[in-house]
Image (cartoon, coloured by chain):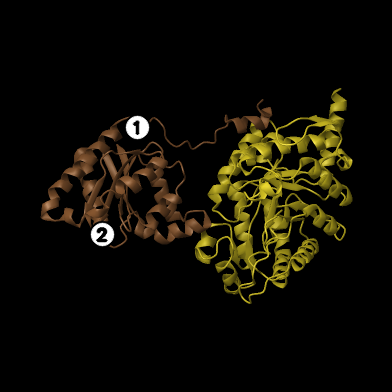
């Protein structure tokens, strides 16, 4: 059984981002029965995230969310797009995360916005962030603007959702990148060895 | 001095008092540090430590000078650092400065060494900030040899080589000042402490205990790995932070403006959340006793407990009142820690007990020879 954490960054209650997250979770369940999904709602952690950026440590409930992300086999990440990019709360959540928390994890990227003009925001803002964090980003990103929730766009959105979750389900079955975070200190690094053995020539 | 040492550590910050907008001058603060140190001796405390800083907004740039002045006016307390920069100070100068302090104070000098917390300090001392860990390792290797060997031939990456060099004065009674290594995030520093069988100090003020537990456990395991003893015999020091009044609510009301505007955590979490999540305790003397005693449950029985009290703009008068209250609870803290202490956990290091240990070791070697 794989575990997936769905991080949803919609700032209003019953946001379209949450709606898209639920659709992705439901679709992933149809692709594979072998997965359990937990949703993390960033709005509920907003104050904790700001506090952690100031103090350098996470409150117990934020730490709980960070631990779930670090322990997950894969992630679904959904955010609204404001001013051509993800909102500060979304970035701050990843800023307070350990640098190596998502190394090698399959990550499905999804975004919502008021108009289709933001449709490439996944490619030019989200994808570089997760490339930096060395996640294994699912090739299909799922973008939904107001248009996609109407009669005309609904079917295309449905297809994109299913294509992306099928890719995620396939990656979850595989061996990933073969790398993941390493929880232990590396006792055999050059600097560690130099403590007992003197500097390397 | 008993099995455990208690003391005060300061970073010597010049912070605005948020309740009246006043700020101490450098002269005020330097003299306040001397007053606080003498107060530590008066209340029956064991250690006074100051953290080396070179940034504006702080005063302790020349700690061995400050400590020499304090040593001349005290008789009992150990003078330590919190921390001294092993990265940017020349190990030759450190060996001589602190050996001089050790002689003049009658063996009351020890050191907590660390990297130093800001990158901009390195170039002020001609060092590369990207080489922090390497400088820590090389400089400490040299400092150790300068104290432990009478004649040193040495070559490294970061300073000119030494040929047939003897640092002066030689350590008092042939036993160098005890060294602790302090770090809040670098496992290599815990490894250095373990390798040399030195002490490890966790500042234990800003973050939840889980963070420090991981580093202290690592140090204890590596201390055993290098053959210095069991993990329980490793030498651990901790920081802590309190504000107390006889009535808990008075302490909270008085400390809140200082907390809310403090340089490190101000404008962030509430005082209540921060107390629940970190070692900070604001309350009655009994609450301070209970929270402090619990440290031994989390980190294992340990040797030195230091408290930060003169920060965030708190006026000297208030700091001295805090020390009076600490003096009142010290007998209870000592008795309670001793009562729970298993046999085999070593006493806190002093010059006297380290000289005695060295002599006992030499005597037993003569018998076997």
Label 1, on which residue?
A176
> Measured along the vertical axis of the image, is residue B313 above or below residue B228?
below
Q: Is residue B92 toward the left or the right of residue B256 in the image?
A: right
Calculate the distance from the C-alpha at mark 2 to the C-alpha at mark 1. 32 Å
Q: Quadrant of residue B347?
A: top right
Q: Residue furthest top?
A: B369
Of residues B122 and B64, the one drawn nearer to the viewer in this rendering: B122
Chain for numbered disc 2: A
x%, y% of residue B23?
A: 68, 71
> Measured along the vertical axis of the image, is residue B105 above or below residue B150?
below
Chain coloured brown here:
A
Chain for numbered disc 1: A
Of residues B326 and A23, the one drawn nearer to the viewer in this rendering: A23
Chain coloured yellow here:
B
Q: Secondary structure at mark 2?
A: loop
Q: Is residue B107 toward the left or the right of residue B85 in the image?
A: right
Disc nearer the start of the sequence (2/1)? 2
Of residues B157 and B177, the one drawn nearer to the viewer in this rendering: B157
Task: Please tell me the numbered disc located at residue A15.
Answer: 2
x%, y% of residue A166?
A: 22, 38
x%, y% of residue B179?
A: 74, 43
Q: Is residue B167 toward the left or the right of residue B118 in the image?
A: right
Query: Which residue lies at the image location 16% right of the left edge and 43% below the top edge?
Result: A159
Q: Quadrant of residue B266?
A: bottom right
x%, y% of residue B286?
A: 63, 65
Q: Residue furthest left?
A: A151
> Measured along the vertical axis of the image, is residue B349 above or below residue B17?
above
Labels in figure, total: 2
| Badge 2 density bin: few <14, some 14–19, many ≥20, Cα 10 Å | some
| Badge 1 density bin: few <14, some 14–19, many ≥20, Cα 10 Å | some
> Measured along the vertical axis of the image, is residue B354 above or below residue B4?
above
């Amino acid at each position: 059984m794989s575990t997936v954490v769905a991080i949803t960054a919609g700032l209003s209650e019953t946001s379209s981002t949450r709606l898209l997250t639920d659709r992705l979770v439901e679709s992933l369940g149809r692709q594979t029965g072998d997965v359990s999904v937990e949703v993390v709602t960033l709005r509920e952690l907003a104050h904790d995230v700001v506090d952690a950026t100031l103090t350098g440590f996470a409150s117990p409930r934020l730490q709980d969310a960070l631990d779930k992300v670090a322990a997950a086999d894969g992630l679904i990440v959904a955010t609204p797009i404001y001013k051509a990019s993800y909102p500060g709360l979304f970035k701050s959540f990843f800023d307070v995360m350990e640098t190596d928390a998502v190394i090698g994890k399959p990550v499905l990227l999804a975004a919502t916005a008021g108009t289709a003009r933001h449709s490439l925001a996944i490619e030019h803002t989200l994808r570089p962030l997760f490339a930096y964090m060395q996640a294994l980003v699912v090739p299909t990103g799922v973008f939904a603007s107001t248009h996609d929730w109407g009669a005309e766009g609904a079917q295309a959105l449905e297809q994109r959702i299913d294509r992306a979750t099928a890719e995620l389900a396939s990656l979850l079955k595989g061996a990933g990148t073969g790398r993941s975070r390493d929880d232990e200190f590396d006792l055999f690094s050059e600097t560690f060895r130099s403590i007992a053995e003197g500097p390397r020539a | 001095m008993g099995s455990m040492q208690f003391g005060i550590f300061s970073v010597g910050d010049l912070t605005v008092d948020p309740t009246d907008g006043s700020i101490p001058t450098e002269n005020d603060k330097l003299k306040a540090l001397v007053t606080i140190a003498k107060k530590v001796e008066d209340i029956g405390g064991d250690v006074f430590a100051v953290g080396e800083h070179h940034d504006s907004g702080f005063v302790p740039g020349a700690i061995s000078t400050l400590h020499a002045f304090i040593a001349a006016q005290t008789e009992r307390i150990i003078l330590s650092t919190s921390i001294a920069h092993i990265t940017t100070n020349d190990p030759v100068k450190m060996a001589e400065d602190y050996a001089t302090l050790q002689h003049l104070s009658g063996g009351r000098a020890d050191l907590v060494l660390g990297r130093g917390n800001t990158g901009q300090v390195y170039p002020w001392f001609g060092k590369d900030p990207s080489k922090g860990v390497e400088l820590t390792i090389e400089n400490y290797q040299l400092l150790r040899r300068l104290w432990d060997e009478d004649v040193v031939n040495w070559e490294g990456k970061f300073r000119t080589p030494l040929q047939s060099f003897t640092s002066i004065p030689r350590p008092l009674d042939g036993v160098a000042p005890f060294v602790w290594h302090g770090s809040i995030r670098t496992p290599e520093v815990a490894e250095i402490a373990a390798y040399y069988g030195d002490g490890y100090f966790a500042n234990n003020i800003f973050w939840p205990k889980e963070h420090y537990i991981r580093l202290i456990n690592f140090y204890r395991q590596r201390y055993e790995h290098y053959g210095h003893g069991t993990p329980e015999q490793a030498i651990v020091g901790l920081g802590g932070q309190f504000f107390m009044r006889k009535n808990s609510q008075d302490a909270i009301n008085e400390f809140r403006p200082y907390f809310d505007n403090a340089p490190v955590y101000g404008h962030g979490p509430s005082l209540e959340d921060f107390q629940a999540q970190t070692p900070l305790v604001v309350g009655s003397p009994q609450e301070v006793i209970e929270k402090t005693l619990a440290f031994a449950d989390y980190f294992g029985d340990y040797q030195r407990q230091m408290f930060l009290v003169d920060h965030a703009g708190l006026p000297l008068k208030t700091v001295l009142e805090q020390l009076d209250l600490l003096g009142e609870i010290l007998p209870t803290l000592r008795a309670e820690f001793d009562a729970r202490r298993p046999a085999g956990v070593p006493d806190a290091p002093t010059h006297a007990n380290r000289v005695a240990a060295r002599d006992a070791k030499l005597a037993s070697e003569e018998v076997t020879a």
